[in-house]
Image (tube, rainbow, N blue to C red):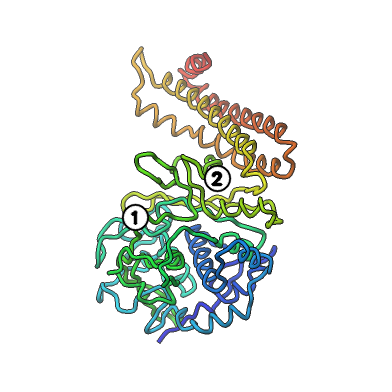
């Protein structure tokens, strides 16, 4: 029998001060959360999945249902070790990754029978089955074994972000809870601050009285309870997949090389992700805000930091709650960040993910003047981008036109894309935009000056990108004529 208990083993990757990342157990992670920084991993899906696991544990051990209870928890500055030890001692056997009866977040008797898959399937950035080879060159015939610590991390991400589509041994696969929406997470100066700031007083997910995280409720792993939800703790640890990790010993080391996988439980249609913003359509109702492969997340800053309900948008509940607590004077720390994570999918494939950490001045995000200012800053950049797009299009169209014949539209688009002018323009502006936000946060009286400097930065980036286009064509026979027409 193999054993790997997540309460004892060092598996969670964390930062501590200015030192390198290290791995701690789940119990140590919460007991020392006030001394730790961030969850650290190459995959943002793992990072967000781990945060949600920790939030489920915090909610169970330190429940808050009122602003006063939340404030008391926040002002303690650290999690009560006695409560942590008592809780984890009660449920210790449920955190064994390879337990014979209750393996953590898995089923022991799998509906797939004896059929197994490569462990590559568990890692969402590896090529396995229908997954495209965008991030990794592993494949089903060359599995890369996972150590138990890494298998646990990937299991958490897999339960949270697996895309729907395709057949499973039970029913067709459906999206996991975090697959479709763009997820936001407030991050503070310590892991304790981050977890409490995202502990919701009212998650707006009904509690039927039997709510519990997956390790307390093994029956929640049953596929036949396809669309039933017990409450918010159940939601955060939803068994969206029936998984079974198969360990073996290779050269004296325990590793996971195979898994079993089937569709688990889906969500009721009315359940909305609390950490995501939604656009409200008069006909379609609430529509999830998703990432767009062609657009960086910071360009939607105003939508992502929305904290007030309107006819058009429902804000993320964690940001909305934080803004209300700040207005009441409960929060002393003003400058937080917001981690945004999302994936783009096509059928059963993950095409790409995006993750970005954006500055979040809580004392300003409810201020209409600040919201209008950031909106104007983004609009100015968008206008410059359109100006660059028109210039590039005119140059390329003229370069590809011969003897009065118009250039073929797809050829223009392809050539324009190869120049990468717009991509360069926006990548140039990402850091300056974050600096613009931070400057406004530190000194609101400097907003006008900061805005003028932002416009100058956009102008310089535009000219730099235009010069790159000019230099790329000026030496060709049709280059000077194409540039002359583009200038007019």
Q: Is residue 35 left or right of residue 123?
A: right
Q: Is residue 247 left or right of residue 76?
A: left
Residue 302 lies in quadrant: top right
Frontmost residue, 56 versus 463: 56
Q: In this view of the protein, can residue 15 be seen by the observer?
A: no
Q: CA distance from mark 2 to mark 1?
A: 24 Å
| Residue 39, x across and y down, in percent | 57, 63
Frontmost residue, 140 versus 51: 51
- Please name the residue that numbered disc 1 is placed on: 269
Task: Give the SS element for disc 2.
Answer: loop
Q: Is residue 403 above or below residue 21?
A: above
Frontmost residue, 286 versus 403: 286
| Residue 3, x across and y down, in percent | 45, 83
Q: Earlier in the sequence, mark 2 or mark 1?
A: 1
Residue drawn at the location 49% of the way across and 59% of the way down:
203
Q: Is residue 167 above or below residue 358?
A: below
Residue 369 lies in quadrant: top right
| Residue 244, x across and y down, in percent | 35, 74
Frontmost residue, 94 versus 372: 372
Residue drawn at the location 58% of the way across and 78% of the way down:
84
Q: In this view of the protein, can residue 429 be seen by the observer?
A: yes
Task: Assign the N terminus to one quadrant of the image.
Answer: bottom left
Residue drawn at the location 55% of the way across and 45% of the way down:
308
Task: Give the SS element for disc 1.
Answer: loop
- Using the image, tell me which numbered label, if any, was put on residue 451: none
Label 1 Cα neighbours within 10 Å, binned few <14 / some 14-19 / many ≥20: few
- Please name the residue that numbered disc 2 is placed on: 308
């Amino acid at each position: 029998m193999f054993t790997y208990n997540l309460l004892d083993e060092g598996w969670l990757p964390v930062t501590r001060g200015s030192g390198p990342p290290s791995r701690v157990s789940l119990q140590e992670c919460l007991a020392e959360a006030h001394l730790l920084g961030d969850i650290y991993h190459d995959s943002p899906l793992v990072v967000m999945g781990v945060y949600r696991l920790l939030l489920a544990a915090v909610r169970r051990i330190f429940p808050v249902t009122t602003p006063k209870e939340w404030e008391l928890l926040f002002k303690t500055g650290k999690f009560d070790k006695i409560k942590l030890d008592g809780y984890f001692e009660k449920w210790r056997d449920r955190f064994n990754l390879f337990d014979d009866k209750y393996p953590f977040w898995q089923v022991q008797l799998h509906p797939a029978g004896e059929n197994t898959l490569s462990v590559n399937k568990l890692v969402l950035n590896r090529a396995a089955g229908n997954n495209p080879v965008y991030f990794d060159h592993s494949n089903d015939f060359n599995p890369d074994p996972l150590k138990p610590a890494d298998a646990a991390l990937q299991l958490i991400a897999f339960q949270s972000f697996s895309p729907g589509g395709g057949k499973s041994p039970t029913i067709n696969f459906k999206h996991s809870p975090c697959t479709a929406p763009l997820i936001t997470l407030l991050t503070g100066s310590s892991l304790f601050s981050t977890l409490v700031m995202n502990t919701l007083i009212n998650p707006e997910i009904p509690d039927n009285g039997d709510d519990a995280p997956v390790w307390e409720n093994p029956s929640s792993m049953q596929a036949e309870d396809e669309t039933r939800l017990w409450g918010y703790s159940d939601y955060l640890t939803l068994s969206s997949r029936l998984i079974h990790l198969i360990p073996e010993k290779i050269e004296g080391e325990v590793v996971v090389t195979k898994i079993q996988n089937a569709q688990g439980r889906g969500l009721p249609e009315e359940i909305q992700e609390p950490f995501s913003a939604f656009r409200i359509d008069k006909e379609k109702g609430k529509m999830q805000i998703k990432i767009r492969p062609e657009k960086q997340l910071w360009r939607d800053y105003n939508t992502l930091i929305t904290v007030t309900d309107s006819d058009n948008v429902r804000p993320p509940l964690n940001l909305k709650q934080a803004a209300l607590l700040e207005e009441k004077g409960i929060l002393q720390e003003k400058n937080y960040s917001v981690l945004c994570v999302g994936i783009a999918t096509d059928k059963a494939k993950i095409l790409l993910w995006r993750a970005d950490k954006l500055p979040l001045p809580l004392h300003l995000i409810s201020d209409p003047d600040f919201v209008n200012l950031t909106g104007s800053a983004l609009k100015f950049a968008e206008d410059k981008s359109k100006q660059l797009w028109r210039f590039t299009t005119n140059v390329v169209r003229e370069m590809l036109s011969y003897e009065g014949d118009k250039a073929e539209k797809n050829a223009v688009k392809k050539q324009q894309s190869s120049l990468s002018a717009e991509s360069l323009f926006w990548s140039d502006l990402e850091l300056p935009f974050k600096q613009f936000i931070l400057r406004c946060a530190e000194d609101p009286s400097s907003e006008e000056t900061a805005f003028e400097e932002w416009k100058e930065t956009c102008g310089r980036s535009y000219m730099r990108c235009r010069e790159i286009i000019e230099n790329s064509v000026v030496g060709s026979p049709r280059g000077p004529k194409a540039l002359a027409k583009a200038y007019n």
